[in-house]
Image: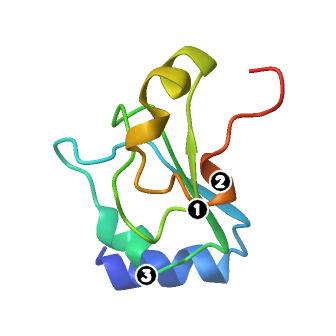
Amino acid sequence: MSDHASAELIRDLDVDIAVDLMGYTAGARPGILRLRGAPVQAGYLGFPGTMAVDFLDYFIADPSYSRSTSSRFSERDRPAARLLPGQ
């Protein structure tokens, strides 16, 4: 299935949140998320850091990783890159 067809299917299924588990690893298909199939999109696990793209709204990480690398996030000026209080 093409990236365009995949993004359209995500829209047709009314997916609210899409979570990318691959990042830039082998077999990844970031082009699907680039087409904004879901209104909220996040990266998690597969790539240990920000992908430095404008089509991911959130980067999910544990506090130890976030604290040690947050100054290098491309999204650091966006609320999505903020640590939760107490973290």
Q: Which numbered dot is residue 57?
A: 1
Rounded to the nearest angstrom, the CA distance separating label 3 from label 2 is: 20 Å
Q: Which numbered disc, 3 or 2, marks the residue that appears first in the sequence? A: 3
Badge 2, how many Cα within 10 Å: few under 14, some, many 20+? some
Nearer to us of marks 2 and 1 is 2
Name the residue carrying label 2.
Answer: 80
Badge 1, how many Cα within 10 Å: few under 14, some, many 20+? some
Question: Measuring 57% from the left and 73% from the top, which residue is drawn there?
Answer: 10
Question: Measuring 21% from the left and 41% from the top, which residue is drawn there?
Answer: 25
Q: Dividing the image into 4 quarters, which one contains the C terminus?
A: top right
Rounded to the nearest angstrom, the CA distance separating label 2 from label 1 is: 6 Å
Which element carries disc 2, helix, strand or loop? helix
- Pinpoint residue 35: horizontal percent, then vertical percent: 43, 81
Q: Amino acid at mark 2?
A: Ala
Rounded to the nearest angstrom, the CA distance separating label 3 from label 1 is: 13 Å
Question: Measuring 26% from the left and 52% from the top, which residue is drawn there?
Answer: 28
Q: Dividing the image into 4 quarters, which one contains the N terminus?
A: bottom left
Q: Which numbered disc, 3 or 1, marks the residue that appears first in the sequence? A: 3
Where is 17 relative to 4, above or below? above
Q: Amino acid at mark 3?
A: Leu
Q: Is residue 11 left or right of residue 53?
A: right
Which element carries disc 1, helix, strand or loop? loop
Image quadrant in which you'd find residue 77: bottom right
Q: Are marks 2 and 1 in contact (CB under 8 Å)?
A: yes
Q: Which numbered dot is residue 35?
A: 3
Which element carries disc 3, helix, strand or loop? loop
